[in-house]
Image: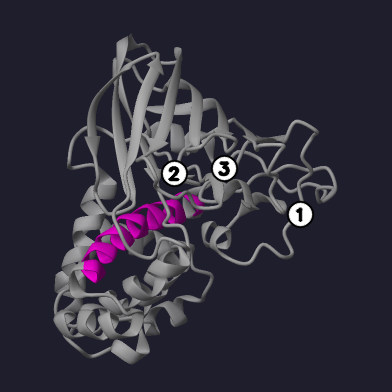
Amino acid sequence: MSTTDRFRPESMSSGDEAGRLRAELGRLCRGRGATSVDLRARLGPEIDELLRIHRRNASRSPTDADERSPRSDLTTLLAAGVARLPADLRLVAAAALGLEPSAQGRFLIDRIGWLTGRIGRDERTVRRRLGEALALLAEALLVLRDEALAPAGPPGPPPDPGTARPARDAPDAQDARDPWYLRRMRSLVRLDLPQPEVYEERVVVATRDGLESVVLSASLPRPGSQAVGGRELHADVLSGGLLTARERPSESLFRFVVTLPRPLAAGADHRLAVRLTLAPGQAMADYYGLTPLTRCDEFQLRLRFSPASPPTGVWLLDGVPPRIADDDPSGLPAVELDRVGECLLTFPAPRLGRSHGARWQL
């Protein structure tokens, strides 16, 4: 359960913007996808709004903008979102949307058949992965939108690369949309136990009056040694709330609805403590990180390994694209453990849409 956890405050309604965008992407996959002749008529309001922001922020002349077709703008936008998906889901999303050259011009059922042969999985597994890919793609596209809307700061001297930390991304714009944000998150990953456990403490801050619940989302990647078989992620609220619902939009994405003891007024903070565990015998992937999709002022991660069987290596993930966590760690900064097998990593103002944490090799 080296879960690269993604947290985004969401309403309890199934009509949240990520859900609406996910549904529109699913409809877009039908038929010939992005190569459909009637493409313009098939775009929903959420995708239309993303395209409007994309065109407004594109750096090109008015003449060039007039010559570009909606299809070209759409494929550019979708490709940018797909590039932010985990490596194993990029091909699935690209083929389903009609962006993969080897699968273009076919109907969705044909593209799914092409994927079964390409990745060596049955149709049911491919469709399950497609659902996961579209859910994460919707989140990635919203992050791209937030980055495009982020106001540019006043010009200043370039930061010292040896000491500077990235500033929090567009807090005012983000806070206006989200009902809460994270003032601080602290995670303890226990890898010295027979079965790994993760303890997370969050200080959430309400951005509007009457906040009654929060939704915690976590993505559970499949370890390389576990090619098949189901995965489960369990959450226990240790303090600060009551777990009232558990949702699983896709194979690896989990959502936990936590009801607060009392409604929070705007500006009030509240502390939550949660323990995440896997099913007995379930393997854990070899990394853990936070990829914030809303404001987070500080993230602190402590890893604890057994001194009797230390890892062969630990590497830092400091604001990297999420998919890098799945790649070869060579080139990443090494992390030293102390004599009891622990390391403590602190990330001030982690960047939206980037992964912060660590990976290891046992």
SS label for mark 2? loop
Q: Are marks 3 and 2 in contact (CB under 8 Å)?
A: no
| Residue 134 appears left or right of 354 | left
Judge whether 77 appears above or below 207 on screen. Answer: below
* Residue 74 horizontal/vertical position (percent): 34, 73
Based on the displayed image, in which of its 4 quarters is residue 108 positioned?
bottom left
SS label for mark 1? loop
Crowd band around label 1 with a 10 angstrom C-alpha radius: few (<14), some (14–19), many (20+): few
Q: Label 3 vs label 1: CA separation?
A: 24 Å
| Residue at the spot of label 2 | 6
Which residues are drawn in magenta? 125-147
Q: If you read the primary sequence from the N terminus, does the residue marked by circle 2 or circle 1 appear first?
A: 2
Q: Are marks 2 and 1 in contact (CB under 8 Å)?
A: no
- Image point (80%, 33%), residue name: 339
Q: If you read the primary sequence from the N terminus, does the residue marked by circle 3 or circle 2 appear first?
A: 2
- Image point (72%, 35%), residue name: 341
- Image point (26%, 75%), residue name: 96
| Residue at the spot of label 3 | 169
Magenta stretch: residue 145 in it? yes
Judge whether 76 appears above or below 324 on screen. Answer: below
Q: Which mark is residue 333?
A: 1
| Residue 248 appears left or right of 360 | left
Q: Name the amino acid, label 3.
A: Asp
